[in-house]
Amino acid sequence: MKSSAKNISLTSLDDLFSTEEERSKDVVGTVVNIPLAQLHDFPNHPFKVRDDEKKEETVESVKAYGVLVPAIVRQRPDGEYEIVSGHRRKRASELAGLSELPAIVRDLDDDAATIIMVDSNLQRENILPSERAAAYKMKLEAIKRQGARTDLTSDQLGQKLVGKTSRELVAEKSPDSPTQIQRYIRLTELQPELQEMVDTGKIAMTPAVELSYLKPKEQELLLETIDSEQATPSLSQAQRMKKLSQVGGLNEDTMLSIMSEQKKPELSSNITLPGEKLKKYFPKSYTPAQIENTIFKLLDSWLQRRQRDQSR
């Protein structure tokens, strides 16, 4: 199928991109206008495109100035295009009444496209835990597949680095530490309903990671128990469920027994940080999840420095 895209000259892309695109050596220096009808979402795109207040601001900007930063796309076998980076820009263009989207067409395999797709979205604000979890898992799997190919001497992340784990490579281009990335990826093992409870704050991140080790049938039973008891598990309750699951002792009776308990304060080792004291260290736009992620990342760095100092 012949594309109806129209070529437009572009003198430089250096001012437009500063993430994965900037590191690639095969950027085509041409922007083309592609009909919106020919643009398709990236398969299993983990980031939701929401029609919220921020989107309204983007739509107004597009109406006034057009799309200033081109999308990144790759061509499909049928001659149409798959969006790698630019789903929000496409939606804003639709709402603004435009018929085309400026884009750069790249020749990318599935893994390279996945890495660019994830990297171009991870720096955004207000990413839900389930979105971040799915994105990290997709990128981690792509990096592992690239590492398994013996015909490659380099990849989208640059020269392959001997001695670094895939999680460490993911962390290099993300706002989270390898440990936090591992915790996020565990969330992908949760049932969708439990993931939604994490997204809405009904279940905190730490107990959610513990619950991710429950078998699918046990998670379904947990959802029924949450509904009947009108309560979600605390960290200590989630930890006990995990231990019972590992020895085959988690059933309807034991789960109900745990969930029907009056929640007790966590052990003194679980420290609560006053929100008022934390406010001065973070931008006002930061959500509780972003604050928690930043604290864990800083603690990981501090621990690594201590370990290095102790080994000297």
Image (spheres, rainbow, N blue to C red):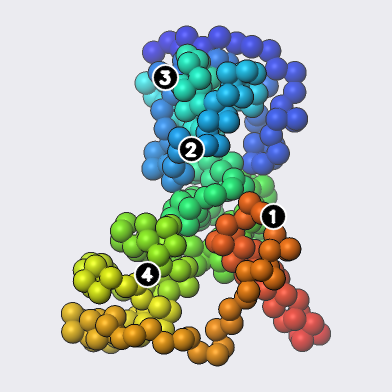
Rendered residue at 75%/81% (across/down): 306
Which mark is first along the chain, 2 or 4? Answer: 2
Tag 4: amino acid: Ser
Residue bearing the label numbered 1:
283
- Toward the viewer: 52 or 11? 52
Q: Quadrant of the C terminus?
A: bottom right
For label 2, the residue is 52
> What quarter of the picture does the N terminus occupy?
top left
The image shows residue 8, relative to residue 242, as above or below, that is: above
Q: Secondary structure beneath disc 2?
A: loop
Q: Could one spot residue 206 in this view of the protein?
A: yes
Please name which of the two marks, 3 or 4, marks the residue nearer to the observer: 4
- Numbered label attached to residue 38: 3
Q: Is residue 229 left or right of residue 52?
A: left
CA neighbours of label 4 inside 10 A, class few (<14), some (14 to 19), many (20+): many
Q: Is residue 6 above or below residue 180?
A: above
Q: x and y percent of residue 47 in the render?
A: 46, 44
Measured from the top left, where is residue 199 in percent x and y?
43, 57
Specify the amino acid type for callout 1: Pro
Label 4 belongs to which residue? 212
Circle 2: residue type:
Asp
**Residues at badges 3 and 4 in contact (C-beta under 8 Å)?**
no
